[in-house]
Amino acid sequence: MIEGLAVLALAQVLTLSAGEYTGPSDSQFGEIEEVTYRKSNWEPWRVWGGADVHYYDNIRSINLLSPTLAGVLNDEDDFVYHFGLGVGYTPLITNNLFLDTSLSQEFYRFDKLNQLDFDYTNADLGFIYVIQSLRDLEVFARYRYEHLESGTFESKLYGMHSFETGAQQVYRFAPGQSVFGQLKARWALDASPDITGYDEYSMNVGYKWESEPFEVTFSYRLGYSDFDEIDRADWNHVVMLRGEYHLRDWVTFGADASFTSNASDLKAFDYDTFGIGAGVSLQMSF
């Protein structure tokens, strides 16, 4: 039963990632790291926090996970309340090389489906290198640890050590307008339970329009996940439109709409989900 819940919790993270607040780098959707090199007065410490609420028309189908839960959540809609906070330290080591570290804690609570409540911890340690000759192309490599617990703090549902690497580019082609892209690969080093370990390869592209205090981003993410211990591979598509209003340099209000489609070798994990939501985020750098 614990292994089934772990797979379910992992599926929730992959689904909910389309709309969640994850700190200044927006690492779950958008997946574009903060552009470090162009800031002459770079401040290495970042502290952030945020809260949002999202509505999803199809939380998840779990028909193959457990006979006692089979079909209970098929096409179920619900509101998801999310709170997160974190800290990052990204000092300049040389002219082009940055140390990249962060630690974040997030809490997910469901309005109706309380049995799905979970808490998510993420820790990163790695490097970012800027290649000036390639329009400040950023390449990165990092170790990551992820940990999920049930919302009651009573049991660990999932934990994974992984290594990821990739490259990203932001290109400004007009005042207040830019396009961005990223390629990333992540390999599982160790997972608990074993069946939750997976490798992922993803591509992310998008367009951003900025006119202070407003910002609008349109993004598309394609991900391929290959699970290590079970015969399962997923293709995941996420399209998102997000608008932001920067009340202050450190206070941002945001709203978004997203569509997620997942195609899996295990039919229970085939799903389409539409979500809308809004929230507020706070960030300070020093």
Image (cartoon, rainbow, N blue to C red):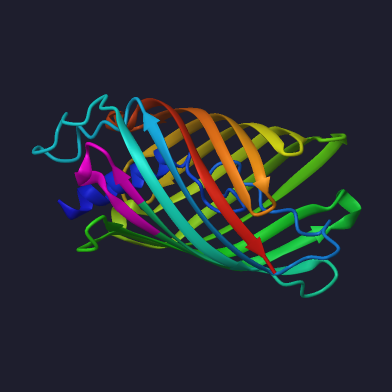
Asked if residue 207 lies left or right of residue 201, the reply is right
Q: Residue at x 67, y 32 (%)?
A: 216
Residue 231 shows in this picture: yes
- Please name whichever residue, 55 or 116, is drawn nearer the observer in this view of the structure: 55
Q: Nearer the viewer, residue 162 or 211?
A: 211
Q: Is residue 111 magenta?
A: yes
User: Foreground residue, 224 or 33?
Assistant: 33
Horizontal and vertical percent position of residue 152: 22, 58
Q: Farthest right residue?
A: 133
In the depicted structure, whether residue 242 falls above or below residue 253: above
Q: Residue at x 40, y 47 (%)?
A: 82
Q: Residue furthest bottom?
A: 93
**Within the image, what quadrant is residue 262 found in?**
top left
69 sits left or right of 234 in the view: left
Where residue 226 sits: x, y (%)?
43, 44
- Residue 2 in the image: x percent, y percent? 18, 54
The number of numbered discs placed on residues in the rendered structure image is: 0
**What residue is at 27 percent from the left and 48 percent from the top?**
117
Q: Which region of the structure is painted magenta?
A: 108-120
Q: Is residue 236 left or right of residue 129?
A: left
Residue 277 drawn in magenta: no
